[in-house]
Image (tube, rainbow, N blue to C red):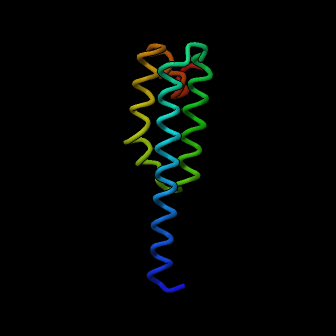
Amino acid sequence: MSAEDEKQAQIDEENRCIRRLRILTDLVKAVLAKDPTLSIEEAVALIRQTRNAVMRAFPGKDSAYEIIYAPKFERILKERFGEKAVEILHGSIH
């Protein structure tokens, strides 16, 4: 495999990871916003698990998660469950 082929394979793999990430985060946002059976605790756990999945897929990209996804999840959480849910997410309330 040539260096150009290897580079293209890396780009293709990163694009696949980005697509999977987009699908995952879109699903999480939909569940957070629309699942009538979801509790605050389950919502917080779902967000934490999603963050862990993003960190595994893109190690060292914590700041990107905090800038792009965390505010979206927190907004939905706050709209759905109130400020208390965001405090639970950040560990202020257990």
User: Residue 7 at x, y = what percent?
Assistant: 46, 76
User: Residue 72 at x, y = what percent?
Assistant: 40, 31
Q: Quadrant of residue 39?
A: top right
Residue at image point 54% right, 32% down: 47
User: Residue 93 at x, y = what percent?
Assistant: 56, 19
Residue at image point 48% right, 65% down: 12
Q: Is residue 1 left or right of residue 80?
A: right
* Residue in the foreground of this view, choosing between 18 and 50: 18
User: Residue 57 at x, y = what percent?
Assistant: 55, 53
* Depicted 80 relative to depicted 9: above or below: above
Q: How many marks?
A: 0
Q: Quadrant of the C terminus?
A: top right
Q: Quadrant of the N terminus?
A: bottom right
Q: Quadrant of residue 68?
A: top left
Residue at image point 62% right, 23% down: 42
* Depicted 41 relative to depicted 7: above or below: above
Q: Is residue 48 left or right of residue 62?
A: right
* Depicted 33 relative to depicted 12: above or below: above
* Residue in the foreground of this view, choosing between 62 and 38: 38
Residue at image point 46% right, 44% down: 22
